[in-house]
Image (spheres, grey):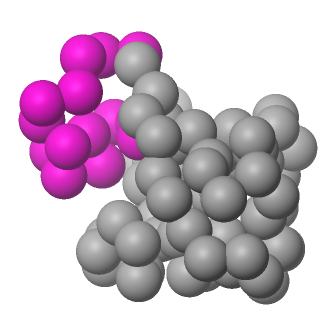
């Protein structure tokens, strides 16, 4: 199956060839989960991904993926105080 992936903020450094705001296809075996995508397919350090959205909905790492899903990954976000 093929899912479309977008990496945000500091995660973009893992795919510098992808233009800002662009998604890229990722081939996965059937039955793959968000967790498989993050660690096995993309090779991202697990602790660097804080939020995963699948088709715009916050999802946990056990969520199974389907062909054509859109996945957005975000690192932990720090900020603000005030």
Task: Specify the segment rendered in magenta.
Answer: 7-21
Figure quadrant of the N terminus: bottom right
Q: Is residue 53 left or right of residue 27?
A: right
Could you tell whether 81 is left or right of 55 in the image? left
Residue shown at the point (78%, 64%) measured from the top left = 65
Say if residue 81 shows up in the picture: no
Left of 9 or right of it: where is 18?
left
**Closest to the observer, 5 or 79:** 5
Vertical side of 64 occupied by 31: above or below? below
Residue 22, horizontal then vertical, whole percent: 40, 19
Q: Where 59 sits versus 53, above or below?
A: below
> In the rendered image of this protein, does residue 78 appear above or below residue 47?
above
Q: Residue at x 34, y 36 (%)?
A: 9
Residue in the picture at 47% in, 41% down: 25
Q: Residue at x 12, y 30 (%)?
A: 17
Left or right? Give the position of 5 relative to 39.
right
Would residue 36 be seen by someone viewing this image from the given angle? yes
Q: Position of residue 16 (x, y in %)?
A: 12, 35
């Amino acid at each position: 199956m093929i899912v479309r992936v977008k990496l945000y903020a500091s995660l973009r450094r893992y795919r510098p060839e992808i233009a800002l705001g662009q998604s890229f296809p990722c081939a996965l075996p059937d039955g793959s989960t968000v967790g498989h995508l993050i660690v096995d397919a993309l090779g991202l350090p697990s602790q660097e991904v804080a939020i995963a959205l699948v088709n715009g909905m916050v999802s946990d790492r056990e969520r199974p993926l389907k062909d054509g899903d859109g996945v957005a990954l975000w690192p932990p976000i720090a900020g603000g105080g005030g």
